[in-house]
Image (tube, rainbow, N blue to C red):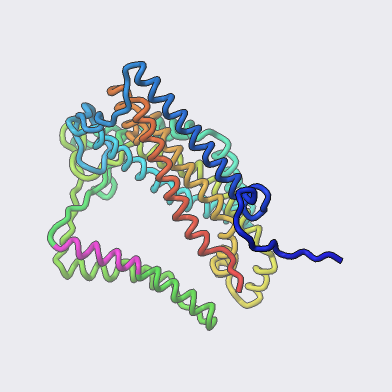
Amino acid sequence: MTSISDPQQGSFRLSMLLNDTRYRSLTFQAIALFLLIVAFAYLGNNLVSNLRAAGLNISFDFLWSPAGYDINQRLIEYDSQSTNARAALVGILNTLLVAFLACVTATVFGVIAGVLRLSNNWLVRKLMSFYVEIFRNIPVLIWIIIIFTIMTAVLPAPSAFRGENPSSSMFLDSVAFTNRGIYVPAPVWGPGSGIVAVTFLASIVGIFAYRRYATKLLYDTGKLLPVLWPSLALLFVPTLVVFFALGQPIGLDIPELKGFNFSGGIKVGGPLIALWFALAIYTGAFIAENVRAGILSVSKGQTEAASALGLRPRRVMNLVVLPQALRVIIPPLISHYLNITKNSSLAIAVGYADVTATLGGITLNQTGRAIECVLLLMLFYLAISLSISAVMNVYNNATKLKER
């Protein structure tokens, strides 16, 4: 009989890079990496040579020139004399804003629709199926245009709020729904408002800590603590106590009709609302199917065992089914979040100034720096996509099944 033994440890020879299985794979990978570097170096040198022959060069000096155009929807101070870099930053923040709002809203819509698609109520189940099949099979660009058209055609103009007998009135005397957007009160930060904000953030951290403690206590001892009312109390009571103790340091700037438009408050423009809800309802239909698939992936015996222990259906879903379904839901959910971020570039269809409209649109056309603008756009979307993937993968690793 022959026996297989480890190769003898001898001196290293160059022939071992191809003949020895311990080094062969590393050799091929090194060769592939070298060829890839050579290919990119050739393409880069070819690009620079062609630009030089055409009298052009790659330069990012245009970022510090005045932009020369206005942006209506912005989160930071900006005017037409600001630099192109400032305009690009405004577009980046607008992109992140609509992506964040759409991700949160789409998750809420998707989870609700996915759970209700499995409801025992025939009407509810069919309504959710109708929502999923209609919204996910029509391009998101069409939904953006439909929602924007409905807003501009149905909602009244600001002039409808003028006069002794206006045809329209403000909601709660502080919110105005118009065809130009929604005007809501803006916070006015006074002395001590920072303490109130820190208290509110600490309350949110306290809610997560309490819920984690309640879950651990349930799994360790079987004792079930109330979660909803303590969470609401932690969210509001400390903040309200500090708010009134400091003499109400945070006020409200109520929007008022002056001339032909509202002034004061915060304007949530129609393009932002159309893009936000179109991305949310479109992606929410896909998330609903992922949620349904995740719930169905959990063995029916798990539900029956939980019900046999006396748990109510809502508790069974929250404590038994959904935690196990997350292992199936989260991986495709990451892709949907990435799609929301990239689909936000369709904002230009309704005039929303995201980074594609500012840096990749107006700035590119005014400066003629197509290569530089496209490179910056690619770097931004790559960076934000990798960041979303990294954060969600951390959460995915926390929820995956762990062997004892």
The quarter of the image holding the C terminus is bottom right
Where does the image place residue 255, in percent across and percent down from the top left?
20, 44
Specify whether residue 400 is in view. yes
Q: Residue at x 59, y 66 (%)?
A: 401
Going 48% across and 52% down the picture, which residue do you hit?
A: 107
Q: Which residue is nearer to you in this view: 269 or 210?
A: 210
| Residue 154 relative to residue 404: left or right | left
* Percent x, y of residue 382: 43, 42
The image quadrant where one finds the N terminus is bottom right
What x and y, as percent, mark residue 296?
65, 58
Q: Which of 315 and 81 is in front in this view?
A: 81
Residue 197: within the magenta?
yes
Residue ID at (56%, 40%): 136
Q: In which quarter of the image is residue 373?
A: top left
226 with respect to 294 (left or right): left
Q: Which residue is most to the bottom?
A: 221
Q: Determine the main secondary structure of the stretch shown in magenta.
A: helix
The stretch of residues the image draws in magenta is 192-205
- Height in image: 140 above or below 105? above
Magenta region includes residue 391: no
At 64% across and 63% down in the image, what residue appears? 9
Determine whether 116 is above or below 214 in the image.
above
Residue 116 in view here = no
Indicate left or right for 117 with 265 as reference: right
355 above or below 237? above
Q: How many labels does the image show?
A: 0
- Residue 49 pos. (x, y %): 39, 22
